Image (tube, grey):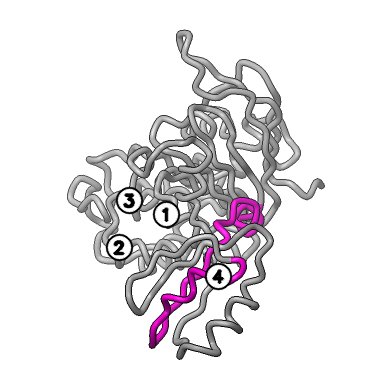
Amino acid sequence: MSVNAVRLEGITKAYKGHVAVHDLTFEIPRGDLFGLLGPNGAGKTTTLRMITNILGPDSGRIEVLDLVPGQASRDRIGYMPEERGLYPRMVLEEQLIFLAEIKGTPRAEARRRLPPWLERMGLAEWGKRKVNELSKGMQQKAQFIATILHDPEVLILDEPMTGLDPIGANLMRDVLLDMKRQGKTIILSSHHMETVERLCDSIALIHQGRKLLDGPVGEAKKRYGRNAIALGFEGDGSFVANLPGVKRVSDEGHFMEIQMEKGADPQAILREVALRLRVNRFEILEPSLRDIFVSLVGGTDAEVAA
């Protein structure tokens, strides 16, 4: 058994002359919470559909749980597409049990598993109702239950926070973290980079079908660090701009962001500042994934949805 749950090597997919995914390669370790990131139209959904064998690549190779994608691996995957796929006029609990049966779970076992999930997702009172009677947020939670009721080893979630209010989004985050602790491999695709940044162990960032970077989140931030300090203080901080190692300063009175020269020691700057000012905040800033994306594509924040 390999250490990776999913492995993509040189994957390419085109539609009518448009290359949606180009020579994409990355690996997802078993038990990882992995973020597939990029703006709308980057090729994320196409990539997920190839991993689940809904689509086949034009070239390249995919392995899921050491298998080429097919029925054997598909039943060990839970896939939640961005578009809701539940039958609107079918009773919720009967539909969820039916979908688990399709994935190989005996009906009696699906019935046993379902009530705790309905309770946890706030749908216990809605099990006997038809899906079209549920709100959009409730339908999103119901689709998540459909994705995990057969107890898959790999979860693939395409924009799972869509339609959820802040309380529902927090619940979804808690559930995903619990499932990661249980050893599940989770692939979370989103253009909401801030959400994924807080949850994921590692990422692949793609743009126009091409990979910009991949690897652990911490390593990506170190690689593209802004070399900056946030400083909160009391006193006259005008001297900071002239300290050795300081490249430039954005001064807002009692707060400033200090851009350091390459190789500068932030602790040396702190020592000098602390001699002359009362320091109430000193933080070495990491770039956000949004910052990294903008720096790599040479665009603006408008290219990335908030």
- Residue 302 placement: quadrant: top left
Disc 1 marks which amino acid? Ile
Dot 2 amino acid type: Leu
Pick the residue in front: 33 or 245: 245
Q: Which residue is mark 3?
A: 140
Seen at 43% across and 60% down, the residue is 114
Q: Is label 2 in contact with label 1 (beta carbons under 8 Å)?
A: yes
Q: Secondary structure at mark 2?
A: loop
The residue carrying pointer 4 sits among few (fewer than 14), some (14 to 19) or many (20 or more) residues within 10 Å by Cα, namely: some
Q: CA distance from mark 2 to mark 1?
A: 10 Å
Circle 1 residue: 145
Residue 263, image x, y percentages:
68, 61
In front: mark 4 or mark 1? Answer: 4
**3D distance between C-alphas at marks 4 and 1:** 40 Å
| Cα distance between the residues tagged 2 and 4 | 43 Å
* Residue that numbered label 2 is attached to: 123
Q: At label 4, which amino acid type do we have? A: Ile
For the record, the magenta segment spans 216-245
Tell me which residue sits at (30%, 67%) in the image: 167
> Which residue does the image show at 46% across and 43% down from the upper left?
294
Q: Which mark is residue 198?
A: none
Q: For mark 3, give the secondary structure.
A: helix
Question: Which of the two labelled residues, at mark 2 and mark 1, occupies the earlier sequence position?
Answer: 2
Residue situated furthest right in the rendering:
1
